[in-house]
Amino acid sequence: MCSTASFGAANSCGTESVMIKSKTNKRTDVCFKCKTGLPFVLIRHGDPFCGPCFDHHLVHKFRQGLGKTKILYPGETVLLNVSGNVSSLAMLNLMATGYDKTSHKKITAFPKILIIDDSCLFDMAESPVPAILRIIEKVPDMPKQTFVIPFELIFLENYQERCRQFCEDNATRAVVDLKEMDTDFDGLSEAARSSFQKIKTSSAKEDIHRSLHLQILSTFAEILKSTKVMMSEVSTDLAARLLNTVAVGRGLYVPNETQYLDTRLPGLTFINSMREFTPKECAFYLRRLAITPITIISHSTLSDPIVGSMSRLTDTFISGLQANFPSTVSTVMKTGAKLQTVSNAGANCDVCFLPLPQSGDVVQDLSLLGLDEGLCSGCQIAVSESHESVRGLICRRANTKEILDEFLID
């Protein structure tokens, strides 16, 4: 990790430099790349980079992933899942560099930004959405349209059709705020909040919450006629998810969760565009851009710091190892990349969309919980831990695109 011993010395590019010492206590006073600029940050194996070289390094790494997979086609719509945290804002601004007039190879896909507002679940006094919109408004060059999606809409009857109609009616607006829909949002917010409060464990809350997020994203991918959704989890997040996936009984699906392209749903690809980035790189990139990220509240941050949730414990474990053994995350990710992706030729889990084992084996008799036997083992665990308050998560999907129909709570 770097040490910000002193600030204020301007480098040749007009930015503030950070006087840094490497782990060997040797002063690094020149950029590793250009050999002339003053160092701004230490990355990789302690190599110092000046500001411009650091920017170029990150842009190249971001574009390299898109270029290798050739996943974006000219004129198609790509959705960007932006939460306002460090990695999502870094992803947004790195994507914008592909539309710069000086860019060597411009990105020709049309981006649409999705902001899922979870504030209803945490009884927040103020939603983070206005602050996120102000940041998005300042992103240069990139053509964009933003959709603000209140999480509680998923509890609305026939919400897919209602959202589709509202988006079609407001198709020309730069910012489409679905909270302007004519419905009882206070009642929906209370229903969503009370539903999650009745779930026993933080692990189950996070699991169900993330699955519902994926369902919202896939719903709006269908509404907006997009087949690509860009996600912003960085390497540390994905490494922790790999361990968490194994711990909750989804070890078969590790490649689906952590590889660059997640094709769990036919016709829809989730792109882990920040897979090769570290939290440190994202944080310093935003510092270069003078962007302050939004503090995001989650079930994990509100859970007991000692007991916590499965994802919080694995994240703390990975972060602790990474701090003392810098190759931890890369080793975990390389190991996960060697595993073979499970084919989605058969049925998919009705909640998280991961492919179900071809054998059709289930962990327990789901009929006792009032559920269909269309859940993977991880979702079975999450639902069984909360079955005293959650009557059912019943999913009916036509052509693998129909999303949540009913979420019944005692």
Image (cartoon, rainbow, N blue to C red):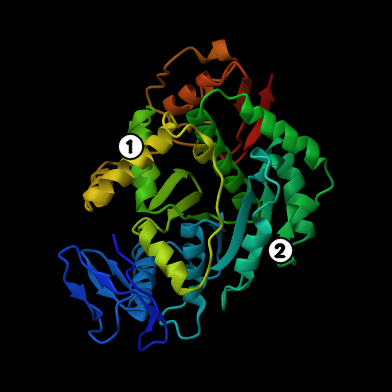
- Camera-side residue: 27 or 67? 27
Q: Is residue 56 above or below residue 1?
A: below
**Type of the residue with mark 2:** Val
Within 10 angstroms of label 1, few (less than 14), some, or many (20 or more) residues?
A: many
Check the image and name the residue furthest to the front. 6
Residue matched to label 2: 175
Residue 192, position in %: x, y?
68, 34
What residue do we see at 28% from left, 68% from top? Answer: 42
The picture quadrant where one finds residue 355 is: top left
Question: For numbered disc 2, what is the local secondary structure?
Answer: strand
The picture quadrant where one finds residue 398 is: top right
User: Can residue 345 be seen at all in this image of the molecule?
Assistant: no
**Type of the residue with mark 1:** Leu
- Camera-side residue: 189 or 227? 189
In whole angstroms, how far apart are the C-alphas of marks 2 and 1?
38 Å
What residue do we see at 68% from left, 40% from top? Answer: 123
Q: Is residue 97 above or below residue 112?
A: below
Numbered label attached to residue 243: 1
The picture quadrant where one finds residue 396 is: top right
| 128 relative position to 26: left or right | right
What residue do we see at 23% from left, 49% from top? Answer: 324
User: Can residue 76 be seen at all in this image of the molecule?
Assistant: yes
- Camera-side residue: 406 or 183? 183
Residue 358, position in %: x, y?
38, 27
Question: For numbered disc 1, what is the local secondary structure?
Answer: helix
